[in-house]
Image (cartoon, helix red, strand yellow):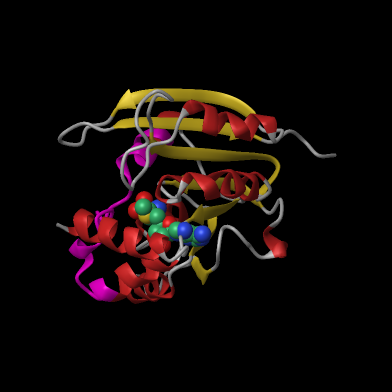
Amino acid sequence: MSRHRAQQLASEFLARADAQGWFEALYAEAGNDYAAVPWADLTPNPNLVDWIITQGLKGAGKTALVIGCGYGDDSEFLAELGFEVVAFDVSTTAIAQCNQRFPNSPVSYQVADLLNPPATWSQGFDFVLESYTLQVLPSALRALAISKISRLIASLGQLLVIARGREETDPPGQMPYPLTQKELDTFEKLGLSNQSFEDYLDNESPPVRRFRALYTVASTD
Ligand SMILES: C[S@@+](CC[C@H](N)C(=O)[O-])C[C@H]1O[C@@H](n2cnc3c(N)ncnc32)[C@H](O)[C@@H]1O
């Protein structure tokens, strides 16, 4: 039901050529009923947690940026690893909910638009997490979003992308729109280096095809 309502809101706003407004509308309508937001698990994303455990990634002395942070669980998880975390979302209600859920959090929660991020964030973060935001943007905005993301990573920094995946020959589907590998290849065209690309079925029921890709930025010295 919550996914259906999100799709309904997305269609309504897209019909008015507003690709972003439905996020705030959905969070505001949900209020404290988190279950009304289809992606709200209120727990760190297992596709992130598994990857971090496998990599043995530690955050002490490093900065991290969480894109489209929603209710903040991935951001809190990265803060627990020692990262100094900035997390942002285009929805003011989502950010207010993060501050309400985690009143003593070290994470800096901010309202910001990925398509027009603060200039001070340019090349600013050692670890950038993009999890499930590209896939809720219509394809017309995805290339712009990818180019904005590529500029947020510091010299020698890492970008982890987690998204639904599909073949180019598959239909684009309904929101959330799975990404193609070709769309993610744009990160390399923008100068990032691909370190790993996983294409797998996750443990959800029914299983969902995911892409999980790690990119790095070379030293800019
Ligand atoms: C599918 S949700 C994923 C939330 C969270 N990353 C998670 O995995 O639970 C996508 C999030 O991106 C946010 N978002 C969409 N467009 C955005 C933009 N242009 N800038 C920042 N956040 C955006 C939405 O408000 C929403 O919280």
- Left or right of residue 151, residue 94 in this image: left
The foreground one among 109 and 115 is 115
Count of picture labels: 0
User: Which quarter of the rendered picture does the C terminus lie within?
Assistant: top right
Q: Give the range drawn in magenta.
A: 29-52
Image position, residue 46 (x, y; %): 30, 40
* Residue 59 seen in this snapshot: no
User: Which quarter of the rendered picture does the N terminus lie within?
Assistant: bottom left
Image position, residue 211 (x, y; %): 41, 30
Toward which corner of the image does residue 36 lie, by quadrant? bottom left
Image position, residue 123 (x, y; %): 71, 50
Q: Residue at x 37, y 28 (%)?
A: 166
The foreground one among 11 and 107 is 11
Relative to 66, residue 139 above or below? above
Image position, residue 90 (x, y; %): 48, 66
* Residue 198 seen in this snapshot: yes
Please check the rendered image and state whether residue 35 is part of the magenta-colored stretch, yes or no.
yes
Relative to 49, residue 167 above or below? above
The foreground one among 190 and 11 is 11
Toward which corner of the image does residue 26 lie, by quadrant? bottom left
Q: Which residue is drawn at 67% across and 59% down?
A: 121
